[in-house]
Amino acid sequence: MERKESTLEVLFYLFENYSEVDDVSQNRNALQGYLTEAGFPPKRIDHAFDWLESLADEDTEYITEPQKKSFRVFSDYECRWINSDCQSYLMFLDEMHVLTPAMRERAIDRILALQDMDFNLNKLKWVILMLLLNQPNSEAAYAWMESIALADQLPQYH
């Protein structure tokens, strides 16, 4: 009997159980077999791999650098999938320079691709970690974000 996990749950399972795999794209067939044996539907597995591979895409031509006094407004469609807590957290990461504006937009794009009605702050933190892990020169931001994601609290500034 197939389980009805979301794409993000497939990704969590993949990272939790097969984190030692360096190149997911080269091991896709074997990993698909493991995920199928674990009970994940093939459609969700394919979507998870497509989503994961898209993290490394370099296509950001649709993103322009914002002006100094500009601000981000979420559309009605984005608000459907990204709640106010997640929106605020994304803006916090942008203000803290953990995410560049282009990376913030990529994160929003990847969140929307998940179409997860139960998307929450914890899931957002993991999406950001996966995004940073797949971006060159993001080691410091990844380490900072990892400590925040695992601590389940915002840092204290004095």
Image (cartoon, grey):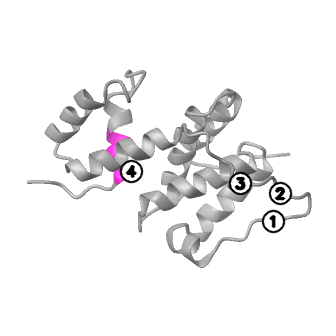
Which of pointers 3 and 4 lies earlier in the amino acid sequence? 4
Q: Nearer the viewer, residue 91 or 52?
A: 52
The residue singled out by tag 1 in the image is 71
Q: Which label is found at residue 30?
A: none
Instruction: Estimate the spatial distance between the alpha carbons at disc 3 and disc 2, rounded to whole Å.
Output: 9 Å
Residue at screen point 69% across, 50% down: 61
Q: Is residue 84 above or below residue 120?
A: below
The residue singled out by tag 3 in the image is 63
Instruction: Estimate the spatial distance between the alpha carbons at disc 3 and disc 1, rounded to whole Å.
Output: 14 Å
Residue at screen point 18% across, 55% down: 3
- Residue 137 at x, y percent in the picture: 69, 27
- Residue 137 in the magenta stretch? The answer is no
Mark 1 and mark 4 in contact (Cβ < 8 Å)?
no
- Residue 8 at x, y percent in the picture: 39, 50
Which of pointers 3 and 1 lies earlier in the amino acid sequence? 3
Q: Which residues are magenta?
A: 7-13
Residue type at mark 4?
Leu
Q: Which label is found at residue 8?
A: 4
- Work out which quarter of the rendered image holds the C terminus and state it: top right
Q: Nearer the viewer, residue 151 or 135?
A: 135
Name the secondary structure under disc 1. Answer: loop
Residue type at mark 2?
Pro
Name the secondary structure under disc 2. Answer: loop
Mark 2 against mark 4, which lies toward the viewer?
Answer: 2
Q: Which label is found at residue 66?
A: 2
- Residue 110 at x, y percent in the picture: 52, 53
Q: Residue furthest bottom?
A: 76
Residue type at mark 3?
Ile
Please give left or right for residue 26 compared with residue 2 in the image: right
